[in-house]
Image (spheres, grey):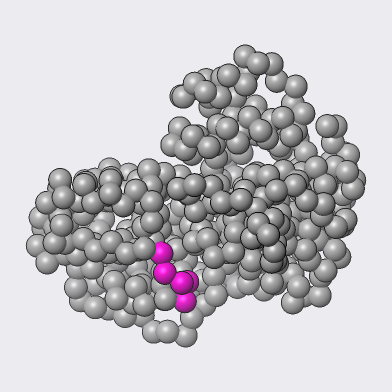
Amino acid sequence: MRIAHFCDSQPGRPDGVARSAELTVRLLREAGHDVDLYRPGPLMSGPGVRSLPVPFRQVRVGLPFTPRPADVVHVHSTGPIGMTGFRAAADWGVPLVATWHTDVVAYADMFVEVPIGAAWCARQLGLGWSAREYLELTRPGAIRHRRLIELGKGMFARMAVAIAPSDKTAAGFAEFEPACEVRVLPTPVPATTLEPVRNNGSVVLSVGRATAEKNPELLLQAFDRVRTARPDARLVLLGVRQQRRHLARRIAALGLDRHVEVHPPVPHDQVAGFYRAADVLAFASTTDTQSLVLAEAEAIGLPVVVADPGLAARPGTADAARFTCEPTPEALAAALLRMLDDDALRAAVTREGRAAVAAYTPEVFLGRLQAIYGRAGKSPGRTSPHW
């Protein structure tokens, strides 16, 4: 089978979208499929789609290109490259499979580029909006939300299968009234032979961006309470590139200067060292659709506290849920302290996390994805959308 993958995250970008697309393509190629991966590359020469960098953002915008025809199109994002995938599926008359990696509706009031990109997507899809409807994207809150849902409906109407990385994300599809088939398929992480490490300390680790959608304020407020109970506690923030000055001001305002370490993104093979040096992973975001860092920490035996009950389910098991709490400073601080102090809880969470990762292997993921492609080819009425 020839499969074309379209992704707007460039190689090396520290996000789950790029890594998920890379893993998916590698597994499919190893299984004998003919796979093209279209993603941003250098402007002048080199692999990938010619692209331009966005100032002050770790983002590249793909320029127009002509993909090679395929039997199935799989889209991972809705930027210029992803929308080329939408159009290609229609032009070729083949099924469109899309993985909803990013909650763009939740991001819309945090990033100015989201409403701009939404307007461009509506034009690309030929939704026939009026000028008034486009202007609704400039109005934060309920009005913008309603317009984004209309855009989502236009996208879902063109899909044969919509893949959700979590049950939480699949439940959120209801707003889009999808006529396509919906499948939950999380991205796996490889199991590790490394033994879990118990440092018997108070090191709280956070991995990922410190921009607004990741809720760093909640994390700092919670850690301030943790430090009150445990004066030796340290918070390690790994993966911070944007908003460093704002983050530094908030750390100083809370009097946490000597208790917080801020690190930029590191190559992925170095992240395991941070997991092994920590005592608990704190996850404060409520906008993620899956978050690979949760399963990565679980694979290595680091207990996780998640301030999003929607991400309680672990890939690979319908039984043992993650240790979650409500997204308030008090609840997150209490959960972190309990995880640091309760050895029985730590042991159970560590055991269950490693078992879930071991059960949900890349081979399981691949088998389910291939079945999705097979079902997509049999979906009636989804291969010739109107543009």
The quadrant of the picture occupied by the N terminus is bottom right
Q: Position of residue 280 (x, y in %)?
A: 30, 66
Picture layout, residue 22 above or below residue 59: below
Residue found 69% across the figure and 66% down from its top: 46
Q: What residue is at 68 percent from the left and 44 percent from the top?
A: 80
Q: Residue furthest front?
A: 44
| 1 to the left or right of 112 | right
Give the total of numbered labels: 0
Can you tell which quarter of the image residue 278 is in? bottom left
Predominant SS of the magenta segment: loop
Residue 211 drawn at (x, y percent):
38, 47
- Residue at x 63% of width, y 72% of height: 362
Magenta residue check for 266: yes
On the image, the x and y values in percent for residue 371 come to 77, 61
| Pick the front one: 274 or 327 | 274
Is residue 18 part of the magenta span, yes or no?
A: no
Residue 191 coordinates in the image, percent (x, y): 52, 77
The residue nearer to you, when weighing 378 against 89, is 89
Residue 330 seen in this snapshot: yes
Relative to the observer, which residue lies in front, 202 or 272? Answer: 272
Magenta-tinted stretch: 265-269
* In the depicted structure, whether residue 95 falls above or below residue 179: below
| Residue occupying the point 49% across, 61% down | 14
Q: Quadrant of the C terminus?
A: top right
Q: Is residue 164 something one can see in this rendering?
A: no
Name the image quarter holding residue 316: bottom right
Q: Is residue 341 left or right of residue 81?
A: left
